[in-house]
Image (cartoon, grey):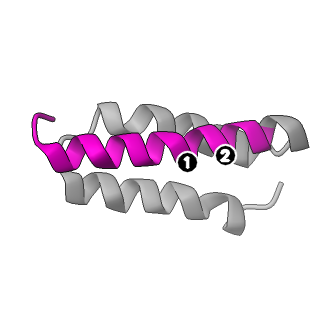
Amino acid sequence: MGDEAGIVWSVFFGAIGVGYFIYGRKQNHIVALLSGIGLMVVPYFIDGATAMVAVCVAMMALPYFVRL
């Protein structure tokens, strides 16, 4: 992931992931907790910025649609 856009997007989604993780841990909301972990980890494995944005936006929407 050598391009600048990928680095910026990964930092952005990692910060959002930290927020989801903290929220999920404090509220005992397992889907938000797992989405937060995913948002922090997934950008390391996806090279393209477009694919990363698509996957991370889907992970951000997941807690809204999956209520456990």
Mark 2 falls on what kind of element? helix
Q: Are marks 1 and 2 in contact (CB under 8 Å)?
A: yes
As drawn, 14 above or below 57: above
Callout 2 environment at 10 Å: few (<14), some (14 to 19), or many (20+)? many
Q: Which residue is mark 1?
A: 16
**In this rendering, position of residue 38 left or right of residue 55:** right
As drawn, 12 above or below 62: above
Image quarter of the C terminus: bottom right
Q: Position of residue 36 (x, y in %)?
A: 60, 41
Q: Tell me which amino acid carries mark 1.
A: Ile
**In this rendering, position of residue 26 left or right of residue 59:** right
User: Residue sitting at 32 percent across and 49 percent down?
Assistant: 9
Q: Residue placed farthest to the left in the image?
A: 2
**In this rendering, position of residue 8 left or right of residue 31:** left
Mark 1 falls on what kind of element? helix
Image quarter of the N terminus: top left
User: Residue sitting at 29 percent across and 33 percent down?
Assistant: 45
Q: Position of residue 62 (x, y in %)?
A: 61, 60
Residue 20's disc is: 2
Q: Residue placed farthest to the bottom in the image?
A: 65
Q: Quadrant of residue 21?
A: top right
Q: Position of residue 48 (x, y in %)?
A: 17, 49
Dominant secondary structure (helix, strand or loop) of the stretch shown in magenta? helix
Question: For the residues marked 1 and 2, what is the alpha-carbon distance in whole angstroms?
Answer: 6 Å
- Check residue 6 for magenta coloring: yes
Q: Quadrant of residue 29?
A: top right
Q: Which residues are magenta?
A: 1-24
Q: Position of residue 42 (x, y in %)?
A: 40, 37
Q: Tell me which amino acid carries mark 2.
A: Tyr
